[in-house]
Amino acid sequence: MDFDFTEEEKVFRKEVDEFVREELPPDWDVKTSYWPAGYGTLAQMETEFADYASEFHRKIGKKGWLSCGWPKEYGGMNSWVKNAIVDEVMSYHRAPYGGVATWISGPTIIEVGSESMKKEWLPKIANGEATFWLGYSEPNAGSDLGSLKTRAVKNGDEFIVNGQKTWGTGAHVTDYCWLLAKTDPSARKHGSATLMIVDNKTPGIDIRPIENILGIHSFNEVFFDDVRVPEENVVGEINRGFYNVMLALQYERLIMGMGAFRRVLEELIRYVKETEYNGQLLKDDPLVRNKIASIAIEIEVIYSFYWRTAWAMDQGKFSETEASVFKLFGTELSVKIACTAMEILGLYGQLERGSKWAPLLDGWASIGYLDAISGPIGAGTSEVQRDIIAIRGLGLPRD
Ligand SMILES: Cc1cc2nc3c(=O)[nH]c(=O)nc-3n(C[C@H](O)[C@H](O)[C@H](O)COP(=O)(O)OP(=O)(O)OC[C@H]3O[C@@H](n4cnc5c(N)ncnc54)[C@H](O)[C@@H]3O)c2cc1C
């Protein structure tokens, strides 16, 4: 077992790191609200940064770094390890890149899409020219997606979609919806829906903002009123939508902004080395050291899991259970880190972005504290992940 990168991977990592350092504006990371650990609000969702973010995203696409894990015939590098390197370095620098299209839809299309769909969509996604949002959840269908009500009725070579989606992250700053809709209401839950791609500009789509806990417009409520979708936009087979979404969710559960964990730890360590409390540097307080050591251990654990998962994917050994373990551990760790940061910063931790007194990157502690709690909910809650691990991973009974 060799836990090191190959020489080629080391050179690649250095190239990505140098590129990002040169490319990002010097004050980039203090301007955005991107919670720098785990699965939180991305800078792309902040309207004021959306243009810069999409320009940066396309530059990364031109370098082939949005699709490193894909097979070579679809413009990839056949390396999930390189993909993981790009994600790690980008998230360390809080770079505004990636999203549903590259992390979720592209890999799913490669596995279940028709050849013509692959030819049409993969190049656009890899170049950063097609961006997506996820249209799964509805007001009465979250964990239990089988209860969804949005209908897609076949009409010649089109589907006519009617219904309402909610929590659509980034629907207002992306191009297409990755939509799950009911196509056969008479079938049992899991054989009744179809996954399809819908152009946001199609007449009949109404996107309305929902502010998140940070006051940022990241979510949307989206209404579909007689929206026409060409049949060729169906992803995989008709009425196999649930199975295809389960596959897409495995990819979604691997999104973690791993490098941000490393960054946060470095910043916390720097802070306690420089900051005095009651005449003593925080670094000399045993409680503070214990807290930092505890999160450092868990960061090391998730890092090992991260590189191992990327390696396993390159060997074709990716499992649903591992994706759930990773998502559960990573998002709960993100909450733990945010709480630890708040405890160490004390009352200063509550200061908001913009306050000149806010320590640590213009207030990331308060941003992180509020944003991190969404991680264990999105892409399937922690309770749902524990169920998947218990039932599918450990063979325990469903009830
Ligand atoms: C940051 C963020 C981004 C999101 N982005 C999107 C998006 O882009 N597109 C989209 O479609 N959705 C999105 N969502 C919605 C997300 O998928 C749902 O919030 C999630 O699936 C949970 O559904 P719910 O909110 O309806 O809660 P519910 O399903 O109503 O759950 C409520 C509580 O009951 C528990 N529970 C439910 N069922 C079970 C069970 N079987 N066993 C044990 N406990 C259970 C849950 O764990 C939870 O604690 C996002 C959510 C967040 C937080």
Image (cartoon, helix red, strand yellow):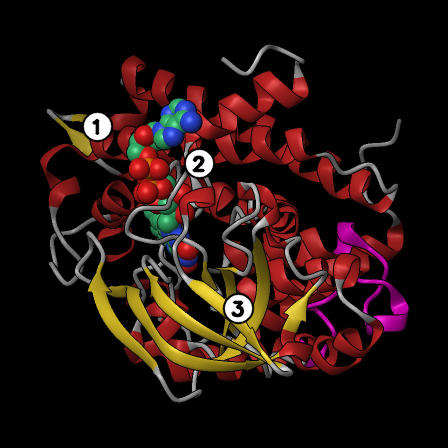
Tell me the amino acid under the disc marked 3.
Answer: Tyr
Confirm or deny contact between disc 2 and disc 3 (CB under 8 A): no
Q: Which mark is residue 343?
A: 1
Q: Which mark is residue 97?
A: 3
Marks 1 and 3, how far apart at CA: 31 Å
Kindly tell me whether residue 347 is visible in this rendering: yes
Q: Is residue 214 above or below residue 226?
A: above
Tell me the amino acid under the disc marked 2.
Answer: Thr
Mark 3 surroundings within 10 Å by alpha-carbon count, few (fewer than 14), some (14 through 19), many (20 or more): many
Classify mark 2 as within 8 Å of ligand 1 or not, answering yes or no: no
Q: Residue 167 location in percent, x, y?
A: 32, 57
**Which badge, 1 or 3, is on the more N-terminal residue?**
3
Q: Residue 166 location in percent, x, y?
A: 32, 59
Q: Residue at x 40, y 61 (%)?
A: 150
Q: Which label sits in the foreground, 1 or 2?
A: 2
Give SS at disc 2: helix
Q: Quadrant of residue 334?
A: top left
**Which badge, 2 or 3, is on the more N-terminal residue?**
3
Q: Which mark is residue 331?
A: 2
**Which badge, 1 or 2, is on the more N-terminal residue?**
2
Q: Which residues are magenta?
A: 61-82
